[in-house]
Image: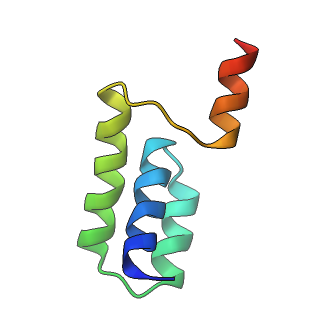
Amino acid sequence: MKRNDIIAALRFAGFHADKKSFTRILIENRISTVCAEKAYASGVKLKSEGAKCLCQDCMKAEVRS
């Protein structure tokens, strides 16, 4: 996995408040804890600012609503 992909996955985990995925990604990849926490926090911030998620699970939930 490339560094940009790792950071995007950590941001995605933060957006969905998924600490389990955050921990797994952090352990499986060589990335600093500080950088990983910043990426996770940016995902949390995106969600709090009202950004929409385009993942399949979120799109299905939106359609059902």
For the image, the number of numbered tags is 0
Percent position of residue 34, x then y: 24, 71
Percent position of residue 35, x then y: 26, 70
Viewed as shown, does residue 7 lie left or right of 61?
left
- Against 25, residue 49 (above or below) is above
Which residue is drawn at the image coordinates 55% and 39% (left, top)?
Answer: 54
Which residue is drawn at the image coordinates 47% and 52% (left, top)?
Answer: 12
In the image, 51 versus 15, the foreground residue is: 51
Percent position of residue 26, x then y: 45, 75
Q: Could you tell me which quadrant the C terminus lies in?
A: top right
Viewed as shown, does residue 53 lie left or right of 36?
right
- Against 11, residue 43 (above or below) is above
Which of the colour schemes (rainbow, by chain, secondary structure, one colour) is used? Answer: rainbow
Percent position of residue 1, x then y: 51, 83
- Against 21, residue 57 (above or below) is above
Which residue is drawn at the image coordinates 48% and 62% (left, top)?
Answer: 9
Which residue is drawn at the image coordinates 37% and 73% (left, top)?
Answer: 4
In the image, 5 versus 35, the foreground residue is: 5
Image quadrant where residue 10 sits: bottom left
Q: Residue furthest top?
A: 65
In the image, 4 versus 47, the foreground residue is: 4
- Against 11, residue 45 (above or below) is above
In the image, 26 versus 46, the foreground residue is: 46
